Amino acid sequence: MKAYARTIFAPPYLEVLETISSPFVHLITDYCSPRACFFGGKALLVGDAFSLLRPHIAFSTNQAAYQALITESFVKGEIGPELWEYQVTKAAYLHWRRSVWFGDFFQRAFYAPLGSAVCYWVTAALARFRTWVGWLPRQSI
């Protein structure tokens, strides 16, 4: 594999590759779960366990902080498990769509990200509407 890497990698990457005894390559993945609350609110998925965003937007920490904020409201009894899950899943889906769009934009031909851009902007418009009517907190977008 190192021989193949020498034919396709740029010199800075080859330098790193040659200094590591057992290099590995990790595939960039993303996932957005449709559910975050299980067993009536006794088990919650948060952070990267719930929604793994592509690294192009550096948003995982923000997502975890937002989910911690919403989880505090849930633990205090200010919101129920259904509302918690609704707010967390809608916000995560919005940011996941953005990470897919940015990934397509930076890694593919100029026309390839058009579909993911449309999906993101439709999702963003719905999130703005949900915030306007009070279904989502402002922090979610």
Image (spheres, rainbow, N blue to C red):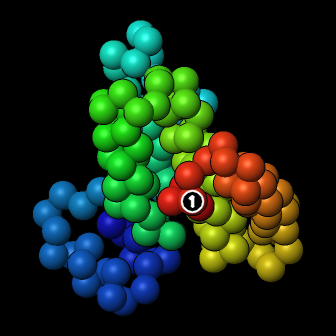
Q: How many marks?
A: 1
Q: Is residue 137 visible?
A: yes
Residue drawn at point x = 33 percent, y = 66 percent: 2
Q: Residue at x 47, y 23 (%)?
A: 81
Residue 26 visible (yes or no): no
Quadrant of the rendered structure where residue 124 is? bottom right
Q: Residue at x 80, y 79 (%)?
A: 110
Residue at 41% x, 53% y: name it. 66
Q: Secondary structure at mark 1?
A: helix
Measured as percent of width and height from the top left, residue 25 is found at: 36, 58
Vertical relation: 113 (above or below) 70:
below
Q: Position of residue 44 (x, y in %)?
A: 37, 27
The answer to whether residue 83 is above or below residue 51 is above
As drawn, which residue projects farthest toward the top? 39
Q: Is residue 23 above or below residue 68?
A: below
Q: Quadrant of the C terminus?
A: bottom right
Is 122 on the left-hand or right-hand side of 101?
right
Identity, as a three-letter code, of the amino acid under mark 1:
Arg
| Horizontal and vertical percent position of residue 17 | 26, 73
Above or below, 63 relative to 16: above
Q: Is residue 114 left or right of residue 88?
A: right
- In which quadrant of the rendered image does the N terminus lie? bottom left
Question: Which residue is identified by label 1?
Answer: 138
Foreground residue among 86 and 10: 86
What residue occupies the far front of the structure in this picture? 78
Measured from the top left, where is residue 37 in percent x and y?
A: 46, 23
Question: 23 or 124: which is nearer to us?
Answer: 124
Of residues 112 and 130, the one nearer the viewer is: 130
